Image (cartoon, helix red, strand yellow):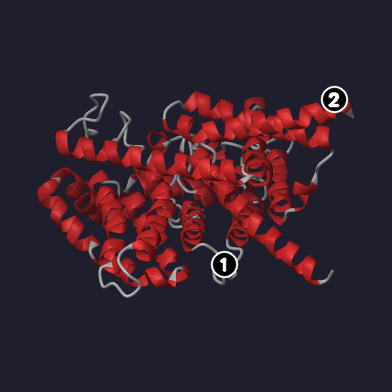
């Protein structure tokens, strides 16, 4: 007991420290971010064992996550009727649990106290501003702080040498923009000041302008979707939000002059891909994923099922991929040349990894996360700080757009974007859990 009494506080500090380091490493240091996530997860498990504290297993999303992960692992067994991969894929499926444990550790230990919660908020805001500043610098000067130019297709790379800044920024911007706008709305001028709404638009317009300059279509569209979600839940912010959203076409039009290559990528290339979607790389990849799923509806092909099955000629189909008709199956759907590491869509990834049951369990997991994150967002309790409420709405919106089904995406657990998702998810779950505990304690006190 004495050893456990000393060990638990030490493990608490390790969980908290590694969690607070994760946003810095996700920004710069992918390998270190992986280590921070692993350390957080392992220390959290050891802490639960030392303290005999397994209360976190009672959270509803944990049960759904366990079912999804268990089925994924079963479908990845490299023998019998299961996955087409080998033991490395099986090990990757087993290791996926570390991301679930990372989110649980953030919810129940790392951000349990006010000081770490405040520190995490400031760290996330700082990372958001840093990425945005690097994008703006590259747009103005042609290079980021490290001398990296724009990508060859015209998109901005921010602090990186490849265009992978806009996706995490779209998630980080939502809590930061919404919280900043509500803060201004509450602080600027007097209680009846006409200047509050225009000033509250400034963070929204600045964030949207950066996303337009970045030149990546899906992050911009998902940012707009996230702001719409925010507007539904934040009534006082609706007027400035609507004006900011209405200004997006103007911002895009201005980018044709300020950043023609961003405009070409956002508008011209996007329009071409929509008109010829079935022939575009995304259309061919999605067709191949559906063909794999149609042939393996119960178990998929195990972890990394798309990568393992993509080059198999049995799945070379043109649209529609479920038909065996020679006419419908004419063409090879791009052959092996279109093969990439994942299906570029989380639903299709779940489907090719673990079949229809795996996809349904994944959908149930996403719903369980959103249900937990959404606690008291529509009806905040009396005394809730508006800025904190806006922050929580932003975290909910970030998770919502991450798992929006009609979108191209990186692999579910691929770093850095997968790490950002689980980090923001854990922060949001932690805030929601504290709100729920407040309500439980107040309810108990009334019955005493």
Judging by the rendered image, the residue that carries numbered circle 1 is 383
Judging by the rendered image, the residue that carries numbered circle 2 is 3
Give the left or right position of residue 24, taking residue 1 as reference.
left
Measuring from the top left, give residue 166's x and y in whole percent: 34, 43
Q: Which of marks 2 and 1 is nearer the N terminus?
A: 2
Residue 269 is tagged as none
Position of the N terminus, as image quadrant, is top right
Q: In this view, does 218 lie above or below 23?
A: below
> Does any portion of residue 364 appear in the rendered image?
no
Marker count (numbered): 2
> Does any portion of residue 97 appear in the rendered image?
yes
**Residue located farthest toward the front when viewing the structure as drawn:** 190
Tell me the residue at 61%/57% (across/down). Answer: 432
Tell me the residue at 12%/47% (across/down). Answer: 258
Name the quadrant containing residue 156. Answer: top left
Q: What crowding class fits label 2: few (fewer than 14 Cα within 10 Å), some (14-19), or many (20 or more)? A: few
Q: Is mark 2 on a helix, strand or loop?
A: helix
Name the quadrant containing residue 70. Answer: top right
Measuring from the top left, give residue 4's x and y in whole percent: 84, 29
């Amino acid at each position: 007991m004495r050893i456990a009494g000393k060990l638990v506080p030490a493990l608490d500090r390790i969980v908290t420290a590694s969690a607070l380091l994760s946003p810095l490493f996700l920004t710069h240091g992918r390998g270190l971010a992986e280590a921070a996530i692993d350390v957080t997860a392992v220390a959290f498990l050891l802490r639960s064992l030392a303290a005999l504290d397994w209360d976190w297993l009672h959270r509803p999303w944990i049960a759904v996550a366990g079912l999804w992960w268990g089925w994924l692992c079963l479908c990845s067994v490299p023998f019998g009727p299961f996955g087409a991969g080998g033991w490395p894929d099986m090990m990757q499926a087993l290791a996926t649990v570390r991301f679930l444990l990372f989110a649980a550790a953030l919810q129940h230990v790392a951000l349990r106290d006010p000081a770490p919660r405040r520190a995490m908020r400031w760290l996330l805001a700082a990372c958001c501003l840093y990425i945005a500043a690097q994008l703006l610098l590259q747009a103005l000067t042609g290079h980021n702080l490290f001398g990296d130019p724009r990508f060859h297709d015209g998109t901005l790379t921010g602090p990186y040498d490849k265009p992978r800044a806009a996706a995490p920024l779209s998630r980080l911007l939502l809590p930061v923009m919404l919280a900043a706008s509500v803060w201004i709305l509450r602080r600027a001028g007097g209680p009846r000041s006409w200047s509050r709404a225009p000033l509250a638009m400034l963070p929204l317009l600045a964030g949207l302008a950066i996303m337009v300059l970045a030149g990546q279509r899906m992050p911009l569209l998902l940012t707009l979707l996230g702001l719409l979600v925010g507007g539904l839940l934040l009534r006082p912010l609706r007027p400035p939000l609507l004006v900011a959203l209405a200004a997006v076409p103007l911002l895009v039009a201005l980018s044709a002059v300020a950043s023609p290559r961003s405009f070409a990528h956002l508008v011209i290339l996007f329009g071409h891909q929509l008109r010829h979607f079935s022939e575009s790389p995304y259309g061919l990849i999605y067709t191949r994923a559906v063909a794999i799923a149609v042939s393996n509806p119960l178990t998929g092909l195990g972890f990394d099922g798309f990568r393992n099955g993509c080059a198999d000629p049995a799945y070379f189909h043109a649209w529609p991929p479920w038909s065996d008709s020679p006419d419908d199956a004419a063409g090879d759907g791009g052959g092996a040349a279109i093969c990439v590491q994942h299906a570029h869509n989380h639903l299709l990834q779940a489907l090719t990894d673990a079949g229809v049951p795996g996809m349904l369990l994944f959908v149930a997991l996403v719903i369980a996360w959103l249900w937990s994150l959404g606690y008291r967002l529509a009806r905040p309790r009396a005394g809730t700080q508006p800025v904190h409420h806006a922050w929580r709405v932003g975290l909910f919106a970030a998770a919502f757009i991450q798992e929006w089904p009609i979108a191209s995406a990186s692999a579910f657990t691929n770093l850095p974007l997968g790490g950002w998702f689980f980090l923001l998810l854990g922060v949001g779950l932690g805030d929601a859990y504290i709100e729920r505990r407040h309500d439980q304690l107040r309810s108990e006190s009334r019955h005493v």
